[in-house]
Amino acid sequence: MNKALGLLSVGLLFLVSCGTKSSRFPEFSVTPTGVHYKLIALGDGTTRATPTDYITVQISYRTEADSLFFSGVRKFQLTEPHFEGSIDECFAMLAQGDSASFYINANSFFLKTLEASIPTFIEPNAFLRVDIRMLEVQTEKQYQQEKEAFLTWIEDFGEYEKVILRQYLQDEHLEISPATGSGLFYISLNKGNGQAVHVGDTVTVHYEGRFLNGKYFDSTKKRSEAFQFVYGQKWQVIDGLEEAIGLMSEGERALFILPSDIAFGQGGSSTGIVPPFTSVIFEVELVEVKSGKK
């Protein structure tokens, strides 16, 4: 097993150049251990996961017939492959930021990796398609440090978060309007035309969300797709973002700092990307306001 992992750990780029073509899946190559793979995108090429590292991945599972049955973000500790062709080999082929698609043996995945029965929707001797994007690679030490910091947040997250916010505001030397009653901070970057937002209006916005350390977790601009919704309807956006948009006028661009209780709260985001008790920053451009029915 170690020999197989050694071959894989040289990276996806090496395998692209020397792997054999897959006879079962066009446009895919296959490793000596039977993992079929296709490179989608390259990341930084330097931070590669090894056993004992903690990895955060965007992952989806599909049947061989391309039916999606799971998609989400997961964080876990990488282990050495327990058998040839296991999903752990797929993770070991990726560096931080890499994206790739794989086909692995479905029976082995369910019986050996998950130690579960094979679902009825999986055909005999079928393969699974696994799409993976390696979001982050952390050493075990880095993970433990992050965990200790998280436990500190849990013990007294209210005061801790206030300290982090205060340090951020001092370090950035920003001219910020006083916080609203909810704790929202508002920094206008470009003025709008004065047309305000009212409940029932259809608004179109571009936004970019990031942590206080500057790392982005969401961006409509990177997706090249503005977000449109009816203002005031429940479950459209998080509370802090709705409040922020309500302070803007059409054409305005502004920066907002949201404490966790009006952002993603004590549970974090549903995707797992934003941790619990985390203040976030949103840069918002209110592109258009269409008046709703009076």
Image (spheres, rainbow, N blue to C red):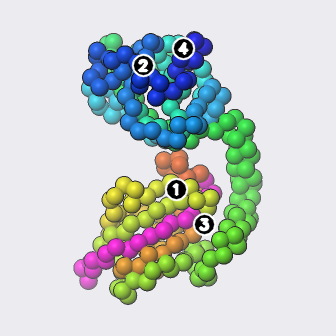
The percent coordinates of residue 224 (x first, y second) are 34, 58
Q: Amino acid at mark 3?
A: Pro
Disc assigned to residue 216: 1
Contact between marks 2 and 3 (CB within 8 A): the answer is: no
Magenta part of the chain: 276-294
Q: Regarding mark 3 in the picture, which secondary structure is present there?
A: loop
The percent coordinates of residue 287 (x first, y second) are 34, 73
- Relative to 284, does residue 223 appear above or below in the rendering? above
Q: Nearer the viewer, residue 172 or 212?
A: 172
Q: Quickly name the residue at label 2.
A: 18
Mark 3 packing: few (<14 Cα in 10 Å), some, or many (20+)? many
Task: Identify which residue is drawn at 59% across, 37% down.
Answer: 47
- Relative to 9, does residue 187 appear above or below in the rendering? below
Q: Is residue 123 at all visible to an observer of this figure? A: no
Residue lying farthest to the front in this orientation: 17
Q: Nearer the viewer, mark 4 or mark 2?
A: 2
Q: Quickly name the residue at label 3.
A: 259
Q: Amino acid at mark 2?
A: Cys
Give the mark nearer the N terminus: 2 vs 1. Answer: 2
Give the mark nearer the N terminus: 4 vs 3. Answer: 4
Q: Quickly name the residue at label 4.
A: 4
Image-quadrant location for residue 10: top right
Left/right placement of residue 220 relative to residue 4 reads left
